[in-house]
Amino acid sequence: MLFRKKLEPQTVEERSSVTMEVELTRPWPEVKWTRNAVALASGEKVEIHAEGARHRLVLHGVGFADRGFYGCETPDDKTQAKLTVESEQLGELGPRVEH
């Protein structure tokens, strides 16, 4: 079972949600999602969806602890991408102009 659409690196703001999606070459009931090589399961912050050949991982309220390399595996293939989490205040720290 091979990936038609692989994971792509993403950058999100802290406390936002992020969706990671893959598409397989044909429908497959289950894939294994990982973060830094540790298996993920559905929970309060993590949603795992499977719709035919498409599989999605949704993370809610991401924080700096959620940064890392996320992966998706089938028996025959795997894909991995980096998730970067930025501080909400980053945009507010731009240069200040004195009047």
Image: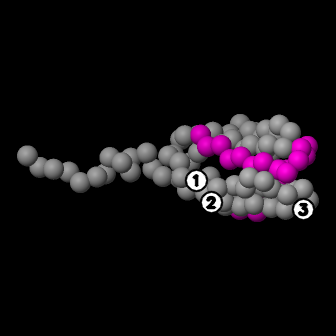
| Residue 50 located left or right of residue 18 | right
Residue 38 percent location from the top left of the image = 77, 59
Residue 47 vs 64, above or below: the answer is above
Q: Residues within 10 Å of mark 3 (few under 14, many from 20)?
A: few
Dot 1 falls on a residue whose secondary structure is: strand
The residue wearing badge 1 is 10
Instruction: Decide if residue 30 is in sight here.
Output: no
Q: What is the magenta range?
A: 17-37
Magenta residue check for 77: no
Q: Amino acid at mark 2?
A: Lys
Residue 86 percent location from the top left of the image = 48, 52
Residue 12 percent location from the top left of the image = 53, 48
Q: Nearer the viewer, mark 3 or mark 2?
A: 3
Q: Which numbered tag is attached to residue 82?
A: 2
Labels 3 and 1: the sequence-earlier one: 1
Asked whether 97 or 56 is in front, the reply is 56
The residue wearing badge 3 is 76
Labels 3 and 2: the sequence-earlier one: 3
Magenta residue check for 20: yes
Q: CA distance from mark 3 to mark 1?
A: 24 Å
Q: CA distance from mark 3 to mark 2?
A: 21 Å
Asked whether 80 or 94 is in front, the reply is 80
Q: Amino acid at mark 3?
A: Asp
Asked whether 53 or 96 is in front, the reply is 53
Residue at x 74% of width, y 52% of height: 5
Q: Amino acid at mark 1?
A: Gln
Q: Quadrant of residue 78?
A: bottom right
Q: CA distance from mark 1 to mark 2?
A: 7 Å
